[in-house]
Amino acid sequence: MKEQYINNDYYEICLDREKNRSYITLRGYWPNLDVVPNLEQDFLSVPKRLHREYTSLLDLREFKTPGQDVMSMFIKIENENAKINVRKKAARIVTQPLEKLAADRVGKDAGVKASAAFFNTVEDAEAWLDQ
């Protein structure tokens, strides 16, 4: 059962412990880290609340490519999460080409080893993660 863990104007994090899955929705434009002061702390707490080889669904449909310091923080978070826990599969919902490029860059720059795929709908992403 999916439970809301964190919710603010810029992101929502839900956890489903039965599926061992995180659901993260990013919203709006983040010009710099000042608008998301708890980003690092909040995102690094996610793998600590799930078991090894968890899956994640990242919804970027309402998100705009952020400023450079935010992108650098996402890369740092991905690197730190890899040390804490192993993510088995990551589904990203992206409908805008620029946001897809940005999400792909974070994964590549962080050297994420999880199987990752892009989707246009939540349903398609869930079906892939459930396989």
Image (tube, helix red, strand yellow):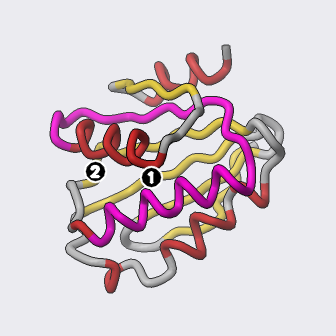
Residue 56 on image: x %, y %: 59, 40
Q: Is residue 96 left or right of residue 91?
A: left
> Badge 2: how crowded within 10 Å, few (<14), some, or many (20+)?
some
> Disc 2 and disc 1: Cα gap in Å?
8 Å
N-terminal of the pair, mark 2 or mark 1, is 1
Residue 24 on image: x %, y %: 51, 51
Q: Main secondary structure of the magenta part?
A: helix
Q: Nearer the viewer, residue 101 or 79?
A: 79
Q: Is residue 19 magenta?
A: no
Question: Does 17 appear above or below 53?
Answer: below
> Dots 2 and 1: beta carbons under 8 Å?
yes
**Quadrant where the N terminus is found in the figure:** top right
> Badge 1: how crowded within 10 Å, few (<14), some, or many (20+)?
some
Location of mark 2 (residue): 62
Residue sitting at x 39%, y 47%: 109
For label 1, the SS is strand
Residue sitting at x 31%, y 35%: 94
Residue sitting at x 32%, y 81%: 35
Q: Is residue 35 left or right of residue 113?
A: left
For label 2, the SS is strand
**Quadrant where the C terminus is found in the figure:** top right
Q: Which residues are magenta?
A: 69-98
Residue sitting at x 17%, y 34%: 97
Question: Does 125 appear above or below 1?
Answer: above
Q: Is residue 97 magenta?
A: yes
Q: Quadrant of residue 72?
A: bottom left
| Kind of residue indicated by mark 2 | Glu
Location of mark 1 (residue): 25
